[in-house]
Image: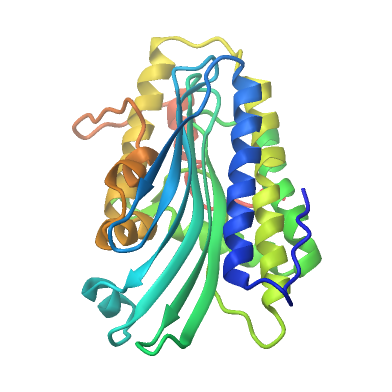
Amino acid sequence: MTFPYNFYLVSIKEQFIQFVHDLQDTICGGVESMDGRAKFIEDKWDRPEGGGGKTRVIANGNVFEKGGVNTSVVYGALPAAMQQAFNVPESDFFACGLSLVIHPLNPYVPTVHANWRYFELYDKNGDRLDCWFGGGTDLTPYYIFEEDARHFHNTLKNAIAPFGDDLYPKYKKQCDEYFVNKHRGDEMRGIGGVFYDYLRPKDGEEQKLFNFQQANGNAFLPAYLPVAEKRKDTPYGDKEIEWQEIRRGRYVEFNLIHDRGTLFGLKTNGRTESILMSLPPRARWYYDYHPAAGSPEAEMMKYYKPREWV
């Protein structure tokens, strides 16, 4: 998927808005096609302070139990809490992005998350003070198939290789270090992927960084759908569902305690329903839970640590 954008005619802000809306259509189409039954429901919303978004949710499908592919374009005065976080004076902001989370029905199919965003910051005269890109994709399997993990990571690596051989190792490391439940003894929520933030374009680099974002966004379906296709019909029972729900509990903990995107959305008066769309429909917590020694679940715990996949 290539978009014929001309950076000399259209602002980077306008181009990115068009990109995420087109990508939303493409990803939703791919997910619906694989599921074969459920369809996304769209909910358009407005933010009183400026902007709005399109939340698309899928539920109770053949393959996907719950998922969302959301876009938002919001702007206005930067809230005091975010001024403090960014260490800036009174400012205005613009933020545009696509965020998705897919929770499959079958425990042998991994949960997946992705986000691609662009941010601008302005002084009170309307002059741009700063801008940056961020994003990434990460995989959260409940049972490991190493060939699936290698496929996922290799697809991401190949997508960004044209922009520099050093980028995949760098952004993989950042992903390993970010999606971690530090309160659980540095336990990763999944097996990572790539994660980057605050990519500021230097002179003449806006085109390159925009193309980099496109490459990452366009790699999502080829990275994830073949894994889901391969595992969606694997037999499972109550034991596997119980483990899936326990690990989903860890997913909830990360999103509500550590995730910067969740915190930013809530602090900027984003739409709560859309922000918390990432939470699974079912999860559970046991007191001081440890999987039985020698079980596949105990073996899986070894994979929630940084590991080289390519």
User: Left or right of 3: which side holds 229?
Assistant: left
Q: In which image quadrant can residue 288 be found? A: top left
Residue at the spot x=59%, y=34% of the render? Answer: 28
Q: Is residue 189 visible?
A: yes
Q: Is residue 138 above or below residue 15?
A: above
Residue 95 at x, y = what percent? 45, 65
In the rendered view, would you say 76 is above or below 200?
A: above
User: Which residue sits at x=32%, y=42%?
Assistant: 276
For the residue pair 46 and 292, the one nearer the viewer reads as: 46
**Residue 292 visible (yes or no):** no
**Is 172 on the left or on the right of 214, as rendered?**
left
Residue 219 locus on image (x, y percent): 70, 47
| Vertical order, 258 against 68 (above or below) | below
Which corner quadrant of the image does residue 301 belong to? top left
Report x, y in % for residue 248: 37, 33
- Closest to the observer: 9 or 277? 9
Residue ID at (65%, 44%): 220
Q: Position of residue 162 (x, y in %)?
A: 81, 64
Q: Count the labels in the image.
A: 0
Of 154 and 15, nearer the camera is: 15
**Can you say whether 68 is above or below 216 in the image?**
above
